[in-house]
Image (tube, helix red, strand yellow):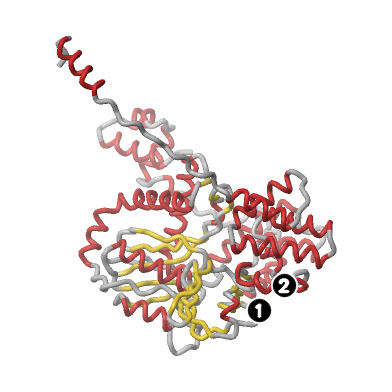
Amino acid sequence: MVKDKQVRRLFEMLQTGKTLASAAAITDMDEKTARKYKRLRMLPSEVEKPHTWRTRQDPFDSVWEKVSAMLNMNFGLQGKTIFRYLQREYPGQFADGQLRTLQRKMKIWRATEGPGREVFFPQEHYPGVLGASDFTCMNQLGITIAGVQFDHLFYHFVLTYSNWETGTICFSENFESLSEGTQNALWELGGVPKEHLTDRLSTAVNKSGNPEKFTDRYAALMRHYNMNARRTNPASPNENGDIEERNHRFKEAVEQSLMLRGSRDFSTREEYALFLRELLDQLNSGRRKRFGEELKMLGRLPMKHLESCNRLDKVKVRSSSTIRVNHNTYSVNSRLIGEHVNIRLYVEHLEVWYGQKKVEMIPRLIGENKHYINYRHVIDWLVRKPGAFANYKWREDMFPTIWFRMAYDSLMKAHVTSVAAKNYLKILKLAARKSESAVDEALRIMINQGMKIDFETVEDLYESAMAMPLVKEVVIPQPDLSVYDELCQYATTAGVE
């Protein structure tokens, strides 16, 4: 079949004075064919008539009215789903090999008769105007800290004009993480864009129907930095497409860097944070020109950070020596039972304040309906009420290490429940009042050597471990300077300078 390229070449040869025969030979074309295109002065694609007829009957003509009705009712139906339905409704009429015919017919229908598709409108960005942020889950990367799976999120902040990006490791999509991540980004940036765009985070955006678009705390954060808050519309994550795309690219870059590193394990969280910091610096290095344009247009930072914590006032300490904070339970010192304390809830810890004094700092729990019980808060009363230990709701938190758990199991085998509980609680009180690590070491020695577990033996081992040898008196003799004089005299006679 003659191509357009050959005919164009034919026309060029004829214009240079070549004969029809020689021009046809040069373009690898039959002379009769060359004569035809010389006469028509048209290309093969212009001569060819469109194929508008079928070479065989459409096997779906008889059922197409039903298929189009199904598509009008549910545009998302796939060709394979409809084809299996037709095979069940009309046994033996449609062979498996006709699936592609139906899919092509449906494709044409969607493009010519189906509903219009969603249109995406490219946006033009301007320097210093918009910063976008989002949380992205990093768990699929398989990061471990000292061999332990490190499940976490990454709060990701991007300037949409230059694509300059930064972020903060966090563990929940709460307001404290949003506030700290945003402020970290702005102070690292050294300025403030005019607008901040997020998706519909519940910590920042009120539910539909609320007269106030944004939560009070988020609105206060935006006012502090003199930024206009923007949000995406419901079910429209594409409106925050810049940060969504950067999330994907960032995690892809982390994955590649981990491959080059040869390990996904980090000795400490600080080492992992430094790894991410160096990667972000590398990614931002290619954006310096546009980033420089943004810096000139950014607003000024305020005088100081805004405190990234949630204050909860008058939280009552229950009779179980616990408080309830954000649907989680934490223990506090039993002295506070019946009192009301103030809570400052930060990203990774909470502070308990009483009488304008901080009395506790506790790791913050992620999620809901969890508990953090410190045995030191309740051990005094457990020793007084050992019968409560067997069925204590949070008994598992009373075993600081595996050796304490094994010690209790050993006591349970050797004694009745009440005696075992009394002995174990005395051991636990010794750990609380003296040294958990020393008692843990004593239990390890006893269990490994098959010794009988009892409080007195543990206490004796603890005391012996704590007994330090007396410091010996060290006598340093007065140096004899005559030796130095002899050495100097020898160097002089030998001519050594």
In the displayed structure, 367 sits above or below 267; it is: below
Mark 1 nearby-residue class (10 Å; few <14, some 14–19, many ≥20):
few
* Mark 2 or 1, nearer chain start: 1
**Left or right of residue 258: residue 128:** left
- Check contact, mark 2 vs mark 1: CB within 8 A: yes
**Amino acid tagged 2:** Lys
In the displayed structure, 220 sits above or below 301; it is: below
Quarter of the image for the C terminus: give it: top left
Q: Which residue is drawn at 48% across and 76% down?
A: 203
Residue 320 badge: 1
User: Picture coordinates of residue 488 (x, y %)?
Assistant: 19, 18
Mark 2 nearby-residue class (10 Å; few <14, some 14–19, many ≥20):
few
Q: Give the farthest residue toward the bottom.
A: 211
Q: Which residue is drawn at 30% across and 59% down?
A: 162
Residue 249 badge: none
Mark 1 residue element: loop
The image quadrant of residue 9 is: top left
Mark 2 residue element: loop
**Left or right of residue 166: residue 317:** right
**Amino acid tagged 1:** Ser
Q: Which of 400 and 287 is in front in this view?
A: 400
Q: Which of 486 and 278 is in front in this view?
A: 486
Q: Is residue 119 visible?
A: no
Q: Residue at x 53, y 66 (%)?
A: 363
Q: Residue at x 72, y 53 (%)?
A: 457
User: Picture coordinates of residue 119 (x, y %)?
Assistant: 45, 69
Q: Which of 267 and 80 is in front in this view?
A: 267
Q: Can residue 436 be seen in this view?
A: yes
The image quadrant of residue 106 is: bottom right
Q: Residue at label 2?
A: 393
